[in-house]
Structure formats: C-alpha cells, structure tokens
Amino acid sequence: GNIQKILVGQDGQWSYTLTGADYKLLDQGSFVAKVSAVDAYGNTSATVSSSAIKVDTVPPALTNFTLADTSITALPTELLKGSVTKDATPDITFKAEAGVTVAVYQVTGNTSTLLGNATETSPGNYQFIYSGASLPDGLNVLKIVAIDSVGNQTERTGTITIDTKAPTINILSETSNNAVASLAKAGDVITTQFTSTDNVSSVTIGGQTVKATLVDALTKTYQASYTVPATGATQGPA
C-alpha cells in the first residue's frame, strides 16, 4: 500500500490530503485507511482503521436525450442536435448515472440561466419537465449539467429550435390531368404547387393527406398530388 509520514502538530492535530499521485494508486470504489502513531522514542501505537472511503474520479454519464413532443425532428442519441419542436415548454428525458443531480440551463451569450432540475424517474433514467415561461421561438441553446455525490461533473450543450407558428402557404397552381385542367372526376389526379415559409412533409387536399415534395429549395416550392376518389365524387373545379 501507499505509506505516508505526517508530522503531528503541537495541538495533537494532523491531516493529510490525497494527491493526484495517490489517486492513481487507488482503484475506483471503497478503501480503508490504516493509521498508527510513532513517538520520538520509536514507540508505535496500535493500528487504527478508518471507516470506508469511496474513491470516484469518473464523471457521470449523460446520454440518450429525447423530447416528449412528437413533432420533433431530432436525433435521440445526440444532445438535441437539430431538434425542432412546437412545444415552448419542452420536456426532456435522458439517461445518467443513478443518484446524480442534474440541472438544465438556457445559455444566452456568456450567461447561463437555470431552468430547473431533472427528476430521476427510475435508477439511471431522468426527466426534465419545464414549467417556466415559454422559450422564445427560434434557436435556443441548452446546457445540461450532471454532478455526482463526490463532485464529478459532466456537461452537455446542444440546441433546440422552438417553432410555434403555423407555416404561411401560397398556392401557385392547381391543375388536374383531366382534358379540362380546371375540372376533375373520379380517378383524375390533381397536382398543386405552393410555397411555404416552413418545411412541409405533407398536405391535406380534398380531405386526403398526401406527401409534399420539395421541387425548388431556393424558393421553398413544393408539389403534391392526389387521386380523386370514386365514392361520392362529382365533376367540378380542380
């Protein structure tokens, strides 16, 4: 083991602070320190053992971030990388070392504002339910800090985009493959082109939800088509 000699003060008090070199000699986990005293004449006292001392130099893990809002477009294993949500008071779930304290901050420039602490819902699983003022629309930088019982700390910083505004749509054209492009009967295909202020994945036409395809990224022009159903269909404007 590692043996250190310590001079006792005139008041009988002594102390020793473990160094980095000491920690390198110790394994993670608990150990017991043994102490004996030797006087000026070489007389040695009985050895006294300390209570167990825990060595933990490993920062806590902090992974698997997800948002509760199902409207997100996020990569769950990366901290809110590219996450987009319509929820301005987002709930975040993640995994961390059991028993740690986890705080969530909003970062603006060099200032970090505490939004609140996460709750451990089961060993190693955490949930942060934000109940403060709504986060502003646009890009928000969040920092999540986990601290274990001995002070080891892990930080993760990422971004989340809040979007609570519906997209603005401008119809450019709407035609069918009917001989008269402004009319459509059952079985005809109606195609519409439109621009949108936001990214669009689907649209509803004639009560049907169909895929929207981006045809011009520069102007944010999309195209969508659907087939007029036979049931209850009547010929009319496209």
Image (cartoon, rainbow, N blue to C red):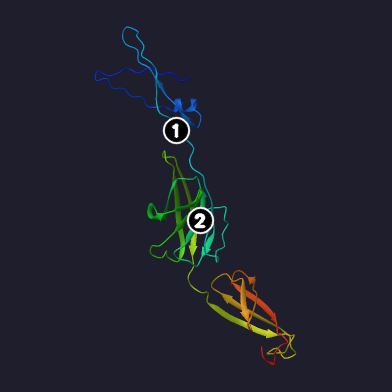
Residue 93 - label: 2
Can you identify the residue that label 1 sits on? 54
Residue 28 - label: none
Q: How far apart in space, not on screen, are marks 1 and 2 (Cα)?
A: 29 Å
Circle 2: residue type: Thr
Residue at the extreme left: 11
Assign the C terminus to one quadrant of the image: bottom right
Q: Residues within 10 Å of mark 1 (few under 14, many from 20)?
A: few
Quadrant of the rendered structure where residue 197 is? Answer: bottom right
Q: The residue tagged with tag 1: helix, strand or loop?
A: strand
Q: Vertically, is 192 above or below 78?
A: below
205 vs 55, left or right, is: right
Q: The residue tagged with tag 2: helix, strand or loop?
A: strand
Residue 234 at what x, y percent from top left? Answer: 69, 92
- Nearest the viewer among 193 and 44 is 44
Total marks shown come to 2
Residue 5 at what x, y percent from top left? Answer: 38, 17
- Mark 1 or 2, which is nearer the eye? 1
Pointer 1 or 2: first along the chain = 1
Q: Residues within 10 Å of mark 2 (few under 14, many from 20)?
A: many
- Nearest the viewer among 169 and 58 is 58
Residue 6 at what x, y percent from top left? Answer: 35, 18
